[in-house]
Image (tube, rainbow, N blue to C red):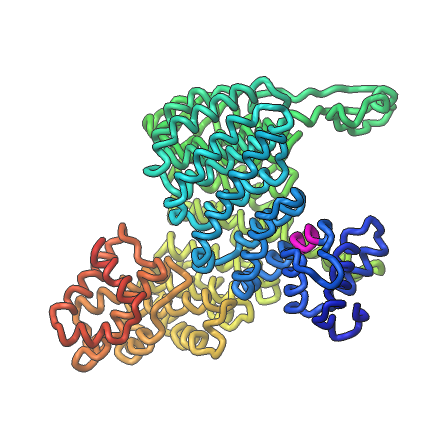
Amino acid sequence: MAASGSAGVPATVSGKQEFYQLLKNLINPSCMVRRQAEEIYENIPGLCKTTFLLDAVRNRRAGYEDPHPRVRAAACTTLGQMATDFAPNFQKKFHETVIAALLRTMENQGNQRVQSHAASALIIFIEDCPKSLLVLYLDSMVRNLHSILVIKLQELIRNGTKLALEQLVTTIASVADTIEEKFVPYYDIFMPSLKHTVELAVQKELKLLKGKTIECISHVGLAVGKEKFMQDASNVMQLLLKTQSELNNMEDDDPQTSYMVSAWARMCKILGSDFQQYLPLVIEPLIKTASAKPDVALLDTQDVENMSDDDGWQFVNLGDQQSFGIKTSGLEAKATACQMLVYYAKELREGFMDYTEQVVKLMVPLLKFYFHDNVRVAAAESLPFLLECARIRGPEYLAQMWQFICDPLIKAIGTEPDTDVLSEIMNSFAKSIEVMGDGCLNDEHLEELGEILKAKLEGHFKNQELRQVKRQEENYDQQVEMSLQDEDECDVYILTKVSDILHSLFSTYKEKILPWFEQLLPLIVNLICSNRPWPDRQWGLCIFDDIIEHCSPTSFKYVEYFRWPMLLNMRDNNPEVRQAAAYGLGVMAQYGGDDYRSLCSEAVPLLVKVIKCANSKTKKNVIATENCISAVGKILRFKPNCVNVDEVLPHWLSWLPLHEDKEEAIQTLSFLCDLIESNHPVVLGPNNSNLPKIISIIAEGKINETINYEDPCAKRLANVVRQVQTSEELWLECISHLDDEQQEALQELLNFA
């Protein structure tokens, strides 16, 4: 093997043998051997490494003997890791060889463990493989998988061997999940075998196989859709119900539980309102599990020492030779049950209405269930969906439910100690405000909320100061810096949730909320100061964007706070900040009224400069640039007196279409429709010379899924195309500039709009 400092390993037989030894060393029990192997492995060139791995996976002869099964298993694992680390380029470059090698290895009946590792590697490879590449091998790959499934099912019946079969059903689920509707032709050959596997897996040691197969069936059903799946829906649901009834009498840590929960969720998604007939059978066990009280105990230290780790208890020492203990084994099941209740409320809405009151009375107290974070997360997440369900029964019932929810939810924002859970609670509150609408908070609620948000913002600034102090301390090093950056990310995430809550208030209360907001105004102004970190400026600008969009023309009274920060941040190095500034300038034109005319005039040159920047369309910058293009369009559309429209319009048209920001893209297309329908001479061009460009913009809008058939703009765009088609010569000229995909996109638009 080449030394770690050399160029790499020669592509010779001896080099391969050494590589196989290296793979063995990568899974050696000795830390020192593994570390040395990792250092050498890192210095092998990528192409050479992949070639050797594929040879090992294929079991190709290399010199004296075939690679050892452990080597082949390690090679499969390493291929999977490379597929993760270098996705999607690895998939694009090696799809043909990797898929063929892994399938061949799965077919080889010599070693179950190698087959299992190959199946696992194929799952990982498929996850990030573009659908367009996967379909090239679809028929042979799927039929190979089915052949292997039949063989492995026979082995299960004869010998009880299950390891490779467990991974195989997960591979099938992954393929179905990736190719979706293209799995329909293969549905009928897989479903009987999968159902038979569930029926056979009755022994205790086959529980994991049963759970994974049920999960696979639900993935396949979701991939092919309701129409195809309905032929097996009743039979599959009976299998699930039978398994569910068995689970109700099983241990809390039964391996089937998590698979069953996710399978029920997919069944609900597949069947939609038809799932409602099964809900009574599913909901009661869920509510029972979600309502379960944890086992707790106060024990002497000696009693704690006598307990086994397998008993499922965790203890906290309280001093005085006493410990507080909680049995954790049931907590995970409780959290999972709560999450499932969230899902059913979200998906079924009207079908869940009969359970709304029972579930909300369960969930609200769980906002303070400090034994398990995910229980509190699910409790918070459920509340907006439960309000949606309650709204179906009328405003009085909805108001009563909100009265039960509101106070505990606000208090939870102020008291929740965990950042991740807090973010979910704040998000839940923001969504609940949007459900309830204007006037849903009384004066006491607003006062308490104002104090909490003020404390969050003040804490944000204080934490930043403390981190700067820690950077000056003697023990400061790279590890400390990483920890400080993690803290900073958590603080910024909470700042985004403060912004979400303010957004919900501005969008529902409009300018009526501004007097309340003024207690927070100095803190928001501080966020957009030039010396603040860029995330502060980004989210500070977003808050002012919301004020302009939802509280105009009254918003103009704050213009001196955000005028210069918004203009100056158009030049910021961070695209997120530029995007926030550009969006703000656009909504000024759209909603701001005449007071904003001069500011809009100042904005145009700055927006154009960003758009024309050499790297403006790179992946990093494109969203900010598209917001700038949209902002120019809004100024042309809503403040035409601020700019020379005829001079700017040709440039604006040349910047279209927008690809990444769908919301802004549809606004630009709507404005384009206005211009075309009014026969604007600058847009149409001399002798309609711009129509080929316009038709290509419409085609690209369809390809990029910007055009939604439910949006009125789709019909307007289709009418533009139809109008051009009335002139055969002009239409032929337009489509001569389009490729096949663009022409198909136009035809699809005409068929549906």
User: Is 322 left or right of 90, judged from the image as shown?
Assistant: right
215 drawn magenta = no
Percent position (x, y) of residue 346?
43, 35
What is the residue that sits farthest to the bottom in this orientation?
686
Left or right? Give the position of 425 relative to 648: right
Whole-percent x, y for residue 117 in the image:
64, 47
Can residue 469 be seen in this snapshot? no
| 70 versus 628 height, above or below | above
- Residue lying at the far top in this picture: please name it: 249
Q: Is residue 456 visible?
A: yes
Magenta-highlighted residues:
72-78
User: Position of 467 compared to 509: left or right?
Assistant: right
Question: Looking at the image, how many numbered discs can be counted on the residues?
Answer: 0
- In front here: 353 or 415? 353
Q: Main secondary structure of the magenta part?
A: helix
Instruction: Look at 66% across and 59% down and name the residue there.
Output: 60
Q: Residue at x 38, y 64 (%)?
A: 586
Q: Position of residue 383 (x, y in %)?
A: 47, 33
Magenta highlight on residue 77: yes
- Rendered location of residue 102, percent (x, y): 58, 53
